Amino acid sequence: MGEDTDATARIDAYIAGLEPPFGAAISHIREVVRAAAPQAEEVITYAMPGIAFEGALVSYFAFKKHCSFFPMGNAVFEGMADEIAPWRTSTGTLQFPPDALPPDALITRMVQARLEENIAKAEARKVKRRKK
């Protein structure tokens, strides 16, 4: 069984075990994230469901009273202050109630920004290796 298949099965089981408002919210976030980066594979990162391409891209999780979207750092939030203002943020986290999800377009932009970051980092590593 491949790593992606194992992660997908674990994420399926995780979502199935969530209470309805949280399960529906996390399932929706998962769909949006996967559509935004179809080339990415599902992973478990920091014990949370997420996706990776050239390294971890984003993860998401349901807590007791809210859901969180983790874009693996604050850089992705730059230039989005007005758009993310309705939700609580913490270092590298966008928090929201399960009945007030961020718009799909905002999540898609964050995933795509992270994808661009990871691709640029991978290219820089390749260039650095060639110079050695």
Image (cartoon, rainbow, N blue to C red):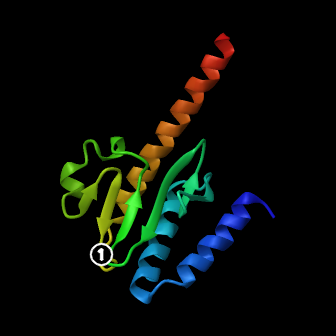
- In the picture, measured across the screen, residue 47 lies left or right of residue 77, that is right
Q: Name above or below for residue 30 compared with residue 128.
A: below
Q: Residues within 10 Å of mark 1 (few under 14, many from 20)?
A: some
- In the picture, measured across the screen, residue 59 lies left or right of residue 89, that is right
- The secondary structure type at the circle numbered 1 is loop
Quadrant position of residue 16 = bottom right
At x 68%, y 15%, the residue is 130
Which residue lies most toward the right here?
1
Q: Which residue is mark 1?
A: 97
Q: Name above or below for residue 9 compared with residue 58.
A: below
The quarter of the picture where the C terminus appears is top right
Q: Nearer the viewer, residue 88 or 118?
A: 88
Residue 25 image position (x, y, % from top left)? 41, 77
Residue 96 image position (x, y, % from top left)? 30, 69
- In the picture, measured across the screen, residue 103 lies left or right of residue 120, that is left
Residue 87 image position (x, y, % from top left)? 23, 64
Which residue lies most toward the bottom here?
20
The quarter of the picture where the N terminus appears is bottom right
At x 65%, y 11%, the residue is 131
